[in-house]
Amino acid sequence: MPDDLIFLDNHSTTPCDRRVAEAVRDVLVNDFANASSQHSMGHAAQQLVQRATEMIAMTLGVPPAEVVYTSGATESNMLAIHGVCLHPRQRRRKVVTAVTEHAAVLEPMQRLAANGFDVITVPVHPQDSPDVGHVVSDLLLAAIDDQTALVSMMWANNEIGTLQPLQMIADRCHAVGALLHCDATQAVGRLPVDLQQVDIDLLSASAHKFYGPKGVGVLIIRQSARRVRLRPLIEGGGQQHGLRGGTLNVAGIVGMGKAIEIATESMDDARRRERTLRDQLWLRLRDAIPNVSCNGQPLESSYRLEGNLNVCFPGVDGEALMLAAANVACSSGAACSSADPKPSHVLLAIGRTEAEARSSLRFGIGRMNTSDQIDQAADRIVAAYQQVRQLG
Ligand SMILES: Cc1ncc(COP(=O)(O)O)c(C=O)c1O
């Protein structure tokens, strides 16, 4: 990373922790065997996988047998949604989700719609409501009935950081025999995610969002309370109980195990620091730039990820502002869809106009950021704002 770059884009990805990188390197160089091989090196690799699995399972409050490894949350979401709905014994033909979900949920849902499923996308409360970003519960509860196969609801939003009331949704799902999938990509490693506390049937996570390597994720498939039947997306080899074929990514899995261990140990401290730094950035911007406003829940809300700040800079183009503040890495709209120039569907869903959405920047503050970086980033953004205003 260039010396003077300030990375405030920790929702799109996080830097790999050096201790994690070291553990990954060790496996790549020394324990490179295929974990399915029946020789001593294969057994050693299998043991590494088992240890990482125990760590991940313990952290998430599930038995190790409920962990299935994938290439990341996009695959986990797809496996959960299509795996449940397209299983040959699935009779129900309805799925429910929220308008603010990530494309990795919305697109598999759209594919189901093309296959004849009834897909209900529930709205969220608008910016002027105290419940901004929360799914409209009356509409959600009414949409879930005995024809619903699956509800997919994210834990934490990747753009505005809103946390959804999941237990209430789980209760409704289970009362009518529907399953609940949760895309917890922005939550795992940042907040306590304990499936002993919240009754979710399928949960997706991705290592690169909590200082682990890219290209490895998990789908947790609960088996204790209800039977979850999944049709695999990737067949062949019979790995992972036939649910996801392919040679295990041992280095990635070990990296994810190490990353979740470190994230859990440092979580309380990281959350406190991220909140302080996020408030520091907001106050600096608010004091220097007229009429800036914050998208999503109030910063003091307990329904907001600590490290998330999403700011509307009225009258300037977010993309231009970002380019002018070149050494501050942040994001205009969701990073995962930034190749697509459309305004953020999440900001539109909370009632922001297209112009307001285009004037917004998302900052994701992470555990490696410092107070000095935040001051410097604020200086650069304020200078960039003045420059863009003058040019405009
Ligand atoms: C909420 C959410 N879901 C899914 C994904 C996709 O994750 P991955 O990069 O692991 O496929 C992201 C990535 O930004 C995300 O934020």
Image (spheres, grey):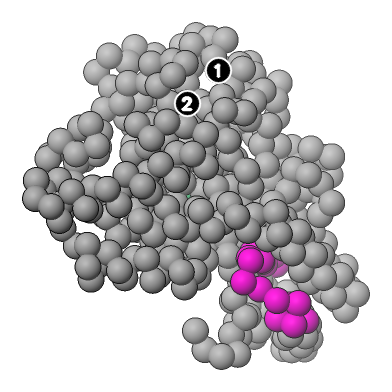
Give the percent coordinates (x, y) of residue 53.
37, 44
- Callout 1: 10 Å neighbours few (<14), some, many (20+)? many
Q: Which residue is mark 2?
A: 201
First in residue order: circle 2 vs circle 1: 1
Q: Nearer the viewer, residue 151 or 386?
A: 151
The quarter of the picture where the C terminus appears is bottom right
Q: Is residue 352 visible?
A: no
Label 2 vs label 1, nearer the camera = 2
Give the percent coordinates (x, y) of residue 52.
38, 49
Q: Nearer the viewer, residue 314 or 97?
A: 97
Whether residue 28 appears in magenta in the rendering, the answer is no
Q: With respect to residue 332, does 391 lie above or below?
A: below
Give the percent coordinates (x, y) of residue 114.
34, 31
Measured in 3D between alpha carbons, the distance from the residue under mark 2 to the one under mark 1, in whole angstroms, is 10 Å
Give the secondary structure at mark 2: loop
Query: What residue is at 81 percent from the left and 46 percent from the top?
Result: 301
Query: What residue is at 31 percent from the left and 26 percent from the top?
Result: 230
Give the percent coordinates (x, y) of residue 154.
56, 39
Q: Which residue is mark 1?
A: 173
Whether residue 360 appears in magenta in the rendering, the answer is yes
Q: Residue furthest front?
A: 40
Residue span colored magenta = 359-375
The answer to the question of whether label 2 and label 1 lie on touching residues, with beta carbons closer than 8 A, is yes
Question: What amino acid is found at the position of numbered circle 2 in the picture?
Answer: Asp
